[in-house]
Image (cartoon, rainbow, N blue to C red):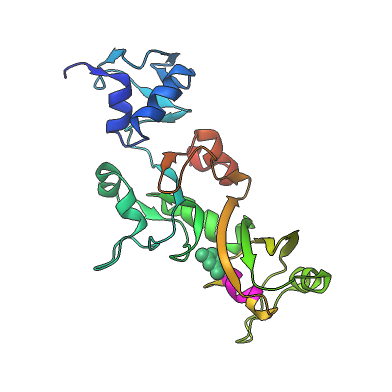
Amino acid sequence: MPLIRLDKYITDTGACSRSRARDRIRSGAVLVDGAAVTDPAAKIDPETVSVRLDGALLNAEEHIYVMLHKPAGLLTASRDRHRATVLDAMPEEWKRRGLFPVGRLDKDTTGLLLLTDDGVFAHRVISPKSGVTKSYLAGVDGVPGPEDVRAFASGIELKDGTKCLPARLEILGGGRVRVEISEGKYHQIKRMLASRGLPVLSLHRESIGALKLDPSLAPGEYRLLTAAETETIAPGILSK
Ligand code: URA
């Protein structure tokens, strides 16, 4: 196979944009056959070397784990006949691997969305039994108070009678709250806050477990999770 520039190879695998690939290479985050290569123009033969970005092996037959900064307006679905989905924001190489979203965010919700081709990983992140918390920032119409915090802590009952697990409500001021939940019922945050007379005006997911949305990702941008990040949210997953 002809030699190819390292930054171009990384971009071709779909791992990230060319400019991000250059930044990560220069900062020593890219290993070729185990050794850091810091020149984005270095030539490699992808057939004969292994390339790791932030610990993740590129283009290997392993599963892939992706962090997307979901913008408003994209549907969390693998495909839709009429509307743009989060899969439309992904490179073709990854779509061909059967990438799918882990859980769902509403069309108007922004923030951290994971995608993978690993069903075991998805189950571990979504299942309430795993106890992986999801943290959201919401703008609400109304003034939340300590009684709302207590109601969340003891488990909100939705208007249709559905009982939610205990959750954390933090009042941030200026009509903003942080909510942490460890399950994922349909429109859960909006329905929990609505049940307290606090309609949601905006919603953004900032973290899943200990994994925070990378602040360097603009809405619509994505990157592979590092091996350490993948293990943080689903311990043991890479050695299964
Ligand atoms: N809860 C909601 O109401 N909407 C989301 O997108 C995520 C959680």
Q: How many marks?
A: 0
By secondary structure, the bulk of the magenta-drawn segment is best described as helix
Above or below, 168 against 115 in this view is: below
| Closer to us: 15 or 19 | 19
| Closer to us: 239 or 229 | 229
The residue at 62%/75% (across/down) is 199
Residue 26 spot, x, y in % from top left: 44, 17
Above or below, 109 against 165 in this view is: above
Residue 38 spot, x, y in % from top left: 42, 13
- Residue lying farthest front? 174
Residue 203 spot, x, y in % from top left: 56, 62
| Closer to us: 240 or 206 | 206
Q: From which residue to which does the magenta span run?
A: 188-193
Above or below, 12 against 167 in this view is: above
Please state if 142 lies on the left or on the right of 205 as rendered.
Answer: right
Ligand 1 lies in quarter: bottom right
**Does residue 230 show up?**
yes
- Residue lying farthest bottom? 160
Residue 195 location, quadrant: bottom right
**Does residue 184 show up?**
no
Residue 45 location, quadrant: top left
Quarter of the figure that contains the N terminus: top left
The residue at 25%/68% (across/down) is 82
Above or below, 4 against 83 in this view is: above
The residue at 53%/40% (across/down) is 214
Please state if 41 lies on the left or on the right of 159 as rendered.
Answer: left
Residue 74 spot, x, y in % from top left: 38, 60
Residue 83 included in the magenta stretch of the image: no
The residue at 63%/85% (across/down) is 159
Residue 192 included in the magenta stretch of the image: yes
